[in-house]
Amino acid sequence: MTADLHLVGQQYNWVGSIFYFGFLLGEWPFGPVMQRLPIAKLLSGTVLMWGVLVSLMGATQNAAGIMTLRFIMGFFEAPLYPMMSVITVMWYTKPEQTLRVTVWFTSLSSVITGLVSWGIGHATTGIASWRLLFITLGGFTFVWGIVLFLFLPDSPLSGGFLNEKEKYIAVDRLKENMTGMHNKQFKWYQVREGFLDWKSWLIVAISILLNIPNGGLVTFAAQIVSGMGYGALQTTLLGMPTGVFQTVSAFIVSGLSRVTTNKRSLWGSLCCLVPMICSILIRKLPSDNKNGLLVSYYFFYFFWGAYPTIISLPLANTSGHTKKLTVNAMVFSSYCIANIIAPQLFKSSESPSYTTGYNAILGCEIGAIVCMGIYAAGCWFENKQRDRIESGATELSADDMLDDMTDKEKVGFRYVY
């Protein structure tokens, strides 16, 4: 791919980074659009568009072409995670949300992509294998967009597979969340509250710190593995287990969080210790110890274990539909910022050791642990304050629990951590 597109110097790094400039640009304009349009239809539309754009990647001829497409792809991916977050909140209770976020954030796609890529690598056609891969994956994505359009409901009330009683139960069981339901009125005071909430900024910081490893390792996966001395097809196959490590670590953290109370930050912090150790091992092991380096590289991907669980915190801790959209936009903007920064830390001049990149991962994991500790302590303190003042407050009705009020306005609201 690099040779076919005549990429030189840091251009490959910018192919990785420019996607997130588009993502960052699209994050905020889509917020009001998500509030006004049927969310499932908007989600399916963006998936359909993404499928077309992925297929077009196979037709690019130079750096300018692929960078332009990557930028547009980032723009249309921007609303996907916020929309899935809103859909998750509309269907599931707080204890259920962590596992659901982990499921839709799973990284098993790398296993499927690896198998498809390996198979295409053996194809004898006049089309370069990387071009054929993009065309194939784009086709799969487009078909999935059609499935979403036909079968994904916009809310429990529009779920055609539920009868009237089941719709009532689906909505009624969410009142304990106290995070409200979908509301089409855009409320500026909720935007302001989202920006002034200290919890929003701590989650933003944690998201940046956890996604710098993501942006670096994912963008340079092939270069890192091939730098250990493996061939092209071997590198493709050896890249598949990374998705398994990401997925297993994410389910371990979310599973532990599900069976314990207010331990999400604790389990996320413990998970961060694994890539911390790996960032030291991969720099200290001799270059001829291919197995040791490969195992260290695989366990790096435990960095992902904490992310879905931590991302579930603002879903559970933010009430008010406009505030939820605002906080989601902040969090996923931080995701973009991290993935713009990360590829620049893996310098081609340092290949295959990538000292700067691995040092950055070590620092990010330490920083994430500190921020998670502060978040947990802050939420515990706020809950204690609310316990003290709630005795004199009027108890909220079931309608108030589902109303479009923010968590600050609901005295009975308690934060999870």
Image (cartoon, rainbow, N blue to C red):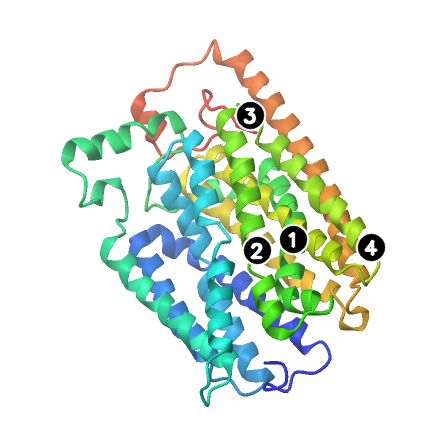
Residue on which disc 1 sits: 298
**Label 1 secondary element:** helix
Which structural element holds mark 2? helix
Residue 412 vs 331, above or below: the answer is above
- The image's mark for residue 285 is 4
Q: CA distance from mark 2 to mark 4?
A: 21 Å
- Residue at 59%, 58% in the rendered image: 336
Q: On the picture, is 96 further left or further right than 377?
A: left
Choose the circle earlier in sequence order: 2 or 4.
Answer: 2
* Residue 25 image offset from top left, x and y in percent: 53, 64
Which residue is under mark 2?
241
Instruction: Please report contact status of discs 1 and 2: CB closer than 8 Å, yes or no.
Output: yes
Q: Nearer the viewer, residue 257 or 160?
A: 257
Gap between marks 1 and 4 measured at Cα? 14 Å
Q: Residue at x 53, y 18 (%)?
A: 386
Crowd band around label 1 with a 10 angstrom C-alpha radius: few (<14), some (14–19), many (20+): many
Provide the secondary structure element on which disc 3 rests.
loop
In the figure, is residue 393 to the left or right of 208?
A: left
Amino acid marked by disc 2: Pro
- The image quadrant that residue 351 belongs to is bottom right
- Around disc 3, counting alpha carbons within 10 Å, would you say few (fewer than 14), some (14 to 19), or many (20 or more)? some
Please say if 142 is above or below 82. Answer: below
Can you say whether 241 is above or below 350 in the image? above
**Which callout, 1 or 4, points at the residue further toward the start of the chain?**
4
Query: Marks 1/2: CA distance?
Result: 7 Å
The residue at 58%/66% (across/down) is 21
Q: Amino acid at mark 4?
A: Leu
Q: Label 3 belongs to which residue? A: 262
Question: Could you tell me residue 185's position as x and y percent?
Answer: 34, 45
Q: Residue 265 at what x, y percent from top left?
A: 61, 33
Rounded to the nearest angstrom, the CA distance separating label 3 from label 1 is: 29 Å
